Image: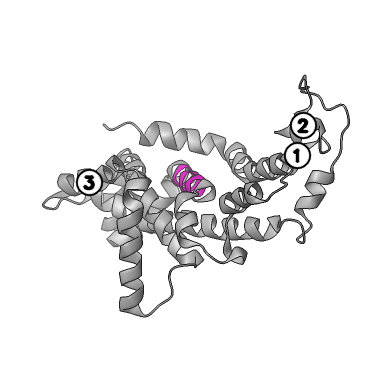
Amino acid sequence: MLSVSLKPPGDETTYPPSLIPRRITFKNYADLFNPRLFPFMRYFQNSMVVALAAASLAIIVAVPGAYAFARLKFAGRELVQRGILSAYMFSGVLLVVPYYRAVIRLQEALSVQLVDTKLVLVLTYLAFTLPVSLYMLGNYFRTIPAEIEESAMIDGCTRTGVIWRVIIPLSGPALVAVFIYAFMIAWNEYLFALVFLISPEKLTLPRGLAELFNTQHYIWGRMMAASLLTAVPVVSLFLALERFMTAGLTVGGVKE
């Protein structure tokens, strides 16, 4: 991608192909920041808002849910856990039609616009990342000694206080792993963005990149430049938090 993104139009299809550009140009990158040619920054901002919101909500919802599965005993706990994970038996393509119909009915019942909004994407990505988030955090919470929580409760902490003052501070690696996982899913998802988003100004990056292919004379260099810049946030986030994510996956992935 880097090589093609630095080639001027015409050089990317020359034969034999060359990994190192004969002529280097940064025009493809400059074109991305020209809203008259391609509104890359608008799509970037839309994707960032959706991905950050979905990842943050995944943490907020998964923490109390995972704690309940890890520490509380109630009838049907194992059945509920397995039922939540069974959602991954069905692909997104199989669920897109019934899910769309459910959103339409909810929209009509609440008299609230959901289709063609960022909110519907955030809720969709939350639903699809929550099962794994619950599984990862639940397994990690089980590795925390229960004696620490009991001591906190003896000192007057409620269950909510235990989660806030004990569990969350001790679960940094797992929380980072879940956040990165949910962020990556929301950042790269295309199918539901294609189904729910209509207005051009609300498109996310995967939809926006697809629009480049729909033009009559798209430029491969510009396409590769956009693809490369799209990968930068996820790669940067992973590299910055790699050690936390590795710890969260290895500890939270082992069930004792």
Q: CA distance from mark 1 to mark 2?
A: 7 Å
Q: Are marks 1 and 2 in contact (CB under 8 Å)?
A: yes
Q: Point out residue 25 in the picture as x, y percentages from the top left corner.
A: 86, 38
Residue type pointed to by label 1: Gly
Give the numbered dot on residue 106: none
> Which residue is labeled 1 in the image?
221
Q: Point out residue 192 in the picture as x, y percentages from the top left corner.
A: 44, 54
Helix, strand or loop for the magenta stretch, by majority: helix
Comparing 243 with 14, the one in front is 14
How packed mark 3 is, by other alpha carbons closer than 10 Å (few <14, some 14-19, many 20 or more), is some
Q: Residue at x 59, y 48 (%)?
A: 210
Residue type pointed to by label 3: Gln
Give the numbered dot on residue 12: 2
Q: Earlier in the sequence, mark 3 or mark 2?
A: 2
Residue reaching furthest to the bottom:
111
Q: Point out residue 67 in the picture as x, y percentages from the top left corner.
A: 29, 51
Residue type pointed to by label 2: Glu
Q: Residue at x 81, y 35 (%)?
A: 10
Q: Is 172 one of the magenta-colored residues? A: no
Q: Residue at x 77, y 61 (%)?
A: 36
How packed mark 1 is, by other alpha carbons closer than 10 Å (few <14, some 14-19, many 20 or more), is many
Q: Earlier in the sequence, mark 1 or mark 3?
A: 3
Q: CA distance from mark 1 to mark 3?
A: 47 Å
The span shown in magenta is: 175-185
Q: Nearer the viewer, mark 1 or mark 3?
A: 1
> Which residue is labeled 3 in the image?
81
**Element under label 3?**
helix
Residue 23 to residue 154: above or below: above
**Element under label 1?**
helix
Q: Are marks 1 and 3 in contact (CB under 8 Å)?
A: no
**Element under label 2?**
helix
Question: In the drawing, does residue 241 fall left or right of residue 120?
Answer: right
